[in-house]
Image (spheres, helix red, strand yellow):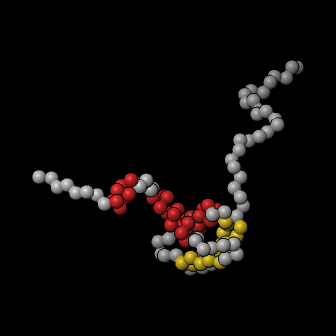
């Protein structure tokens, strides 16, 4: 005989919550790392052996950009990254290329009359 039970409100909320991709989880984690940072603050990141410096820098830069900030990294050695938080540049909306000249036609060159 099968067993039946009523789900709790927490279980229902968990089942109805939108699925979060691995990429979104990582982005949210890095956004949280920058909580409390404002322009002119300095930060330090201690890397583990398996961390890739470039990956960590890129993810932090992306998190800062989402917050309207920018990070300036300073030279460091070992397992430590140092950065300064700066005001970010406001993102410009993507716009189609505007040009006064029409695009060039491709094809063969015209013959020159001799």
Residue at the far left in the pictured view: 1
Q: In the image, residue 108 lies at what x, y percent?
A: 74, 27
Residue 62 appearing in the image:
yes
Which residue is at a point 71% across and 52% down the rendered structure image?
92
On screen, 103 above or below 6?
above
- As rendered, which of 95 and 38 lies closer to the eye? 38
Q: Quadrant of residue 40?
A: bottom right
- As rendered, which of 1 and 35 lies closer to the eye? 1
Quarter of the figure that contains the C terminus: top right
Q: Quadrant of residue 30?
A: bottom right
Residue at the far right in the pictured view: 114
Question: Is 106 left, or right, of 48 in this rendering?
Answer: right
Q: In the image, residue 98 lies at what x, y percent?
A: 77, 40
Q: In the image, residue 100 lies at what x, y percent?
A: 82, 37
Which residue is at a point 59% across and 78% down the rendered structure image?
44
Which residue is at a point 70% across and 70% down the rendered structure image?
86
- As rendered, which of 50 and 69 lies closer to the eye? 69
Residue 61 appearing in the image:
no
Question: Is 91 left, or right, of 9 in this rendering?
Answer: right
Question: Is 35 left, or right, of 97 in this rendering?
Answer: left
On screen, 63 above or below 83?
above
Q: In the image, residue 21 lies at what x, y percent?
A: 45, 56
- As rendered, which of 62 and 93 lies closer to the eye? 93
């Amino acid at each position: 005989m099968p067993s039946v039970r009523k789900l709790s409100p927490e279980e229902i909320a968990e089942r109805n919550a939108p699925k979060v991709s691995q990429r979104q989880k990582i982005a949210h984690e890095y956004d949280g790392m920058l909580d409390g940072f404002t322009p002119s603050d300095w930060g330090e990141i201690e890397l583990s052996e398996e961390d890739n410096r470039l990956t960590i820098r890129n993810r932090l830069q992306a998190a800062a950009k989402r917050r309207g900030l920018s990070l300036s990294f300073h030279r460091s050695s070992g397992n430590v990254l140092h950065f300064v938080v700066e005001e970010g540049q406001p993102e410009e909306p993507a716009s189609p290329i505007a040009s006064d000249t029409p695009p060039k036609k491709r094809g063969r060159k015209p013959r020159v009359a001799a």
